[in-house]
Image (spheres, grey):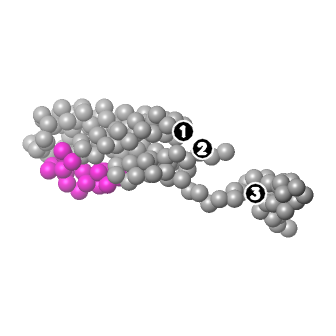
């Protein structure tokens, strides 16, 4: 036997029971909260990729070319910058998952910096850099447009 969504026609015009909440449902199909979780996940993913890529650049890994052309300084300096940016992105993701609005805007700023950093490395690894750039833009969209979503109860 299924219960009605809500009893809005009770005496006095007030609902006597909210069946939707009682049975774990909701009256709206707002998926904004999902976008925020998705954005946090993208930020964490980009942060992890930056940490791995930063370690590869610092340690003279065979994954990266010896004489990669980067816009700023050399490959090791770029590796340290990306490593630090990756760690900061992971921290921003944790703050976004916690529902902190300051972390949300901090995440937008860090994603913007990460997008610029990836574009500076696009001459050495164009597909990798443009893929991360696209993820950054998608996460910025999710945080700016859907970031005010209330935390799930």
Callout 1–callout 2 Cβ contact below 8 Å: yes
Q: Which sits in the foreground, 19 or 61? A: 19
Query: Is 132 part of what is drawn in magenta?
Result: yes
Task: Report the residue marked by disc 2.
Answer: 151
**Residue 13 rendering spot, x and y as whole percentages:** 84, 57
Q: Identify the residue at image location x=52%, y=45%.
A: 148
**Residue 76 rendering spot, x and y as whole percentages:** 17, 33
Q: Identify the residue at image location x=85%, y=67%.
A: 1
Compared to 66, does 88 lie above or below? above
**Residue 72 rendering spot, x and y as whole percentages:** 14, 37
Which is nearer the N-term, disc 1 or disc 3? 3
Left or right side of 74 for 83: right
Circle 3: element type: helix
Circle 2: element type: loop
Task: Report the residue marked by disc 3.
Answer: 20
Cα distance in 3D space between marks 1 and 2: 6 Å
Task: Report the residue marked by disc 1.
Answer: 99
Badge 2 local density, few (<14 within 10 Å), some, or many (20+)?
some
Q: Which sits in the foreground, 65 or 79? A: 79
Cα distance in 3D space between marks 3 and 2: 18 Å
Give residue 69's mark.
none
């Amino acid at each position: 036997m299924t219960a009605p969504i809500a009893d809005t026609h009770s005496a006095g015009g007030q609902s006597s029971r909210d069946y939707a909440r009682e049975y774990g449902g909701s009256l709206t199909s707002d998926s904004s909260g999902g976008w925020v979780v998705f954005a946090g996940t993208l930020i964490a993913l980009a942060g992890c990729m930056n940490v791995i890529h930063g370690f590869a650049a610092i340690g003279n890994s065979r994954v990266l070319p010896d004489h990669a052309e980067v816009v700023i300084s050399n490959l090791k300096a770029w590796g340290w910058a990306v490593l630090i940016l990756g760690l900061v992105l992971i921290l921003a993701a944790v703050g976004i998952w916690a529902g902190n609005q300051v972390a949300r805007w901090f995440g937008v700023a860090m994603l913007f910096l990460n997008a610029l950093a990836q574009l500076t490395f696009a001459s050495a690894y164009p597909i990798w850099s443009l893929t991360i750039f696209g993820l950054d833009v998608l996460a910025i969209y999710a945080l700016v447009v859907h970031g005010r979503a209330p935390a799930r109860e």
